Amino acid sequence: MAVTTARFSPESQTYTPSQSNLWLKNRRWDLTYIVLSVLVVPLPYIFYLLGIQAGVNEDVARNVINGFVAIAVGGPHMMSTFLRTGLDKDFKKRYPMLIRSSIIIPIIVVSLAFLNLDLLLTIFFFWAMLHVLHQVMYVTELYTHKERKVRSISRVTLVSRGIDYALILTCLFPMAAYKISQGSFAIGTNDLTKVIPGAFQQTWFFVAATSVFVVALIAYIIKTAGELRDGTINWPKTIFISLSVIVFFPLAAFSNLDTAFQGANTWHSFQYLPITFYIIQMRQKAGKLNETAPLVNRFSKTDSYKGLYLLSALMLGGSISVFVIVYALAGAIIPNIDANRHFDIAYYTAILSFLWIHYYHDHFLFTNFEALDEEAYAKS
């Protein structure tokens, strides 16, 4: 058992253990998968620019980056959700309506892909931003939960949590609001301002979004300074939140929004995969997988994530099949279809049908803040 060092401050009345106890798993794991994986954020855009410099067509370079990220990390992260939901008999038994209602999502995606692709992408972009930010909030809450476990008295309050959440939820929107107010908000070749109400394409929208963010940022700085002064700061959580805000704030300012957001998606996926695999391995260690999720159990090894990653990647076969089918149908349904639209209909149908179910399930999974508590699996 690790030895902790403690300091009791009469002023704050807070038991402050070694910061090493505040990591979700341990310092090396958190830094590798949760924090320092932030270094992958600029890579998609850098490779996109290198492709342009090498003479590759912009749309080709953009779609190649999209495809690579989807296959390498985005797709496996999307499919790994189903290792905990759709492929787990116990989960399906406990939450049958969540599983059954998921079928509505592909119907909506396919319909919008053919009828109004701009509307589909507008919903996708804003839901994707909320999902990414929801994961940041979830990881933040996991750090808060860990802090409450290891500190006999915690200064985490409803107000302090509200400040953290306010900053996280507003950091992406000032730059997005600015572009929308200027009438220039596009994903790839699709102009989303066509379906965004004109009332939002005004300066007031940018001013309002920025003002809320600035207020949240000032409150966060004051809160953090107070925690630092009192010796109650949770460094792992503070570093994670601060890095997330620094990374997400400028994303919407880039000219190629599609590829810029792939950087955030890559970091998001790098966080999501190990957290999901760690939870699965804890369930396996507690003997919960053999009966409820035998396929997942077969691919899971407690000393490696390779098997679970392989299973998640193999499940992308379903998405690839949907792409091929829809690509063939789109050409038949819409004669002389534009090449970009042809690809986008098939690509976004194949991806979003599964991705939106992943979002839907995660909004539920992200309410389980005890997911990384090993003792919870031993008792269940």
Image (spheres, rainbow, N blue to C red):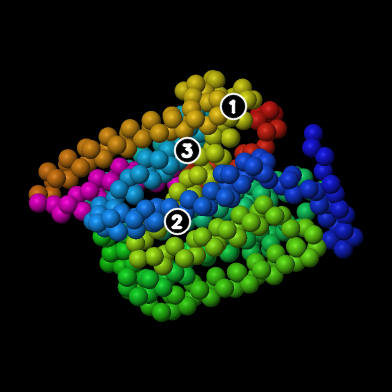
In the rendered view, tell whether residue 62 sits above or below residue 2: below
The x, y position of residue 31, in whole percent, is: 61, 47
Disc 3/disc 1 C-alpha distance (Å): 18 Å
> As shown in the figure, which amino acid type bears the numbered disc 2?
Pro
Q: Residue at x 45, y 48 (%)?
A: 266
Q: For label 2, count other residues whose C-alpha is less than 10 Å away and answer few (under 14), some (14-19) or many (20+).
A: some
Question: Which residue bears the numbered disc 3?
Answer: 81
Q: Are marks 3 and 1 in contact (CB under 8 Å)?
A: no
The x, y position of residue 307, in whole percent, is: 48, 27
**Residue 24 found in image quarter:** top right
Question: Reading the chain from its start, which is encountered first: label 3 or label 1?
Answer: 3
Query: 175 and 122: which one is in front?
Result: 175
Q: Is residue 348 magenta?
A: yes
The x, y position of residue 121, in whole percent, is: 32, 56
Question: Reading the chain from its start, which is encountered first: label 2 or label 3?
Answer: 2
Question: Which residue bears the numbered disc 1?
Answer: 302
Main SS of the magenta part reads: helix
Query: 110 and 5: which one is in front?
Result: 5
Specify whether residue 82 is in view: no
Question: Reading the chain from its start, which is encountered first: label 2 or label 1?
Answer: 2
Question: Which residue bears the numbered disc 2?
Answer: 42
Disc 2/disc 3 C-alpha distance (Å): 25 Å
- Dot 3 falls on a residue whose secondary structure is helix
Query: 14 and 195: which one is in front?
Result: 14
Residue range in magenta is: 336-359
Q: Where the N terminus falls, by quadrant?
A: top right
- Dot 1 falls on a residue whose secondary structure is loop
